[in-house]
Image (cartoon, rainbow, N blue to C red):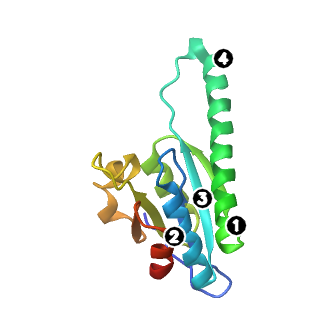
Amino acid sequence: MTTQRRSYETGHQPKCLVIVDDTAEWDRAVYYASRWAIRVGGGVVMLRVIETEDQNQQWLGVADIMRAEAEETANEALDRAAGRANGIAAITPERVIREGDPTEQILDVIEKDVDIAMLVLAANPGAEGPGPIITTMAKTMGAFPIPVTIVPGGLTDAEIDALS
């Protein structure tokens, strides 16, 4: 089921969804999305997905500690990304932390926020491939309910400024 987007209706504001992960290129996606937000008078939603594996019940205490550490790391990453967005566009992005499969969580965030108009990802410019999120999502991108923008990770701020 795809929820109708309402991004440009009266009383709504278009938003970019940006994934903040552990890759070096996340900054390129944040930069592009922040510049886009300035141009269209929109907002930015930053998502950090904590990937969890099935936890054995006998290790519940350890699992709780690992989850708390992962959430702390997620908040630190979102703090850095939000600071970057604020420095670029003087905006305070929305922050979302989810747990589970990245593609499922991305789709769920999009489904629940009718103002998200675009997903912005950044690709690793190196020979090792575009990065884990893009690689994982490549099979399903054609069925996404919103446009997906992939920013080349090797672009400079000035080059992104010219595009956004």
In the image, is residue 121 above or below residue 16? above
Q: Which residue is mark 2?
A: 157
**For marks 4 and 2 on the same chain, the one whose residue lies earlier in the sequence:** 4
In 3D space, how far apart are the residues under numbered discs 1 and 3 (Cα atoms)? Answer: 12 Å
Q: Residue at x 67, y 23 (%)?
A: 65
In 3D space, how far apart are the residues under numbered discs 2 and 3 (Cα atoms)? Answer: 19 Å
In 3D space, how far apart are the residues under numbered discs 4 and 1 (Cα atoms)? Answer: 37 Å
In 3D space, how far apart are the residues under numbered discs 4 and 2 (Cα atoms)? Answer: 44 Å
Q: Are marks 2 and 3 in contact (CB under 8 Å)?
A: no
90 to the left or right of 119? right
Of badges 1 and 3, nearer the viewer stands: 1
Q: Residue type at mark 3: give it.
A: Met
Q: Which residue is mark 3?
A: 46
Q: Are marks 4 and 2 in contact (CB under 8 Å)?
A: no
Q: Residue at x 41, y 60 (%)?
A: 153
Which residue is nearer to you in this view: 95 or 32?
Answer: 32
Of badges 2 and 3, nearer the viewer stands: 2
The image quadrant where one finds the N terminus is bottom left
Label 2 element class: helix
Q: Which residue is mark 4?
A: 61
In the image, is residue 135 above or below residue 92? above
Label 1 element class: helix
Residue 114: in sight, yes or no?
no
Which residue is nearer to you in this view: 3 or 60?
Answer: 60
Q: Which residue is mark 1?
A: 86
Q: Residue type at mark 1: give it.
A: Asn
Alpha-carbon neighbours of circle 3 within 10 Å: few (<14), some, or many (≥20)? Answer: many
Label 4 element class: helix
**For marks 4 and 1 on the same chain, the one whose residue lies earlier in the sequence:** 4
Q: Residue type at mark 4: give it.
A: Gly
135 to the left or right of 24? left
